[in-house]
Image: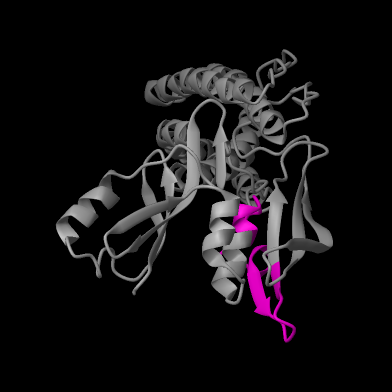
Amino acid sequence: MRLIADLYTTPWQQTFVSSGTACETATQPVACNAELEALSSEKGFRSSCEPDCYAYYLVTTRGDAVEAHTSQEALQAFLGDIDTSQEALLQVFAGRYDLSCTELEKGAVKANADGTFNVVATKGFACGEGSNLTQYLLEVTPSGEVRVKQTHILERGTKGCTVGRRPAGLRSDGSIACADELGQHFALIAHLEEASITAFLRLRDELALHGAAVELQQAALRSALDEVAHTEVCGRLAGRHGATPARAVVAPLPPRPLLEVALDNAVEGCVRETYGALLAHHQALHAEDDEVREAMVRIAEDETRHADLSWAIDRWAVEQLPSAEQEAVRAARPRAPPSAVPRCRG
């Protein structure tokens, strides 16, 4: 009998991995496929409900039987002895480790002569002081046991991990005490989003002072309003994980000369806002959590508009500056690589 296996996740019922042809050996293929299509589970061998739920589970068809394997015990019973690389990776994934399909330092597997498998995986993220993205070298035994052989910190989080526009004079770092790493992460991002409100309001005033077009001024004001919404969204996500974001504290500063405005825009706008837009679009496509995915669709659109504004301001400002100062603005961009951290991770 042919066994068909699909790896699903709820609530959007996306198939991640599929093998074989569903209901191929069924005596009533139409009924079998209808049952497969209607099957859903709120439980899985890797799941979370905080409060929105997602669950990864394995679905198989054998003849007319359609079955969902929704626990680690059920998954292990179905797999039996772990004797292929794919099974070893699935066992590691079920253990809540993260695996990359493109970066060897974050996802790799090797079969050993004694029947075990070595797997490279990761846990955590690098955003916020004290947080780490950790690499694990794991051993998966034929019985399905996952053993930690080595650990290595790939990236350490910092206080200033941000990909958006930070205001000059930012005095707070967003650090909070929270046992949940995701709570810490979302609280820090909400803090940075709140700080960006001040950055855009200040930018709007400085654009007006230096004679920028009204359209640029209005776009800066609209961006500040976008950041208000982002602060609320990321604050709500932090609350789901038991965290309350710290308030952003920004010192009042006098209006800056145009060169300082242009240099700040080159770093915080052209580099960080552009990179933030790219990461937001990535999260909108790949975040596992349904609420995070929905939030990132809106944020990605806004951040793309903010990036466009940054480059428009750059073109306008450079035209107003003498040649030596123009070169200083151009040189500032490549010296300001952003931290590789998405705004809202899920």
**Viewer-closest of 198 and 317:** 198
Q: Residue at x 44, y 47 (%)?
A: 9
Residue 272 spot, x, y in % from top left: 59, 41
Can residue 131 be seen? yes
Residue 34 spot, x, y in % from top left: 21, 50
**Left or right: 204 with respect to 121?**
left
In the picture, residue 205 is in which quadrant? top right
Residue 255 spot, x, y in % from top left: 65, 18
Q: Residue at x 70, y 66 (%)?
A: 120
**Left or right: 161 with respect to 85?**
right
Give the magenta-colored segment's residue range: 92-119
Task: Please identify the quadrant where the C terminus is shown.
Answer: top right
Residue 52 sits inside the magenta stretch: no
Q: What colour scheme has been applied to the protein in the rendered image?
A: one colour
Q: Is residue 256 above or below residue 310?
A: above
**Left or right: 13 with respect to 49?**
left
Q: Is residue 50 above or below residue 272?
A: above
Q: Is residue 143 above or below residue 254?
A: below
Residue 104 sits inside the magenta stretch: yes
In the picture, residue 64 is in which quadrant? bottom left
**Viewer-closest of 324 and 200:** 200
Q: Residue at x 63, y 24 (%)?
A: 238
Can residue 102 be seen? no
Residue 155 spot, x, y in % from top left: 76, 53
Task: Please identify the quadrant where the N terminus is shown.
Answer: bottom left
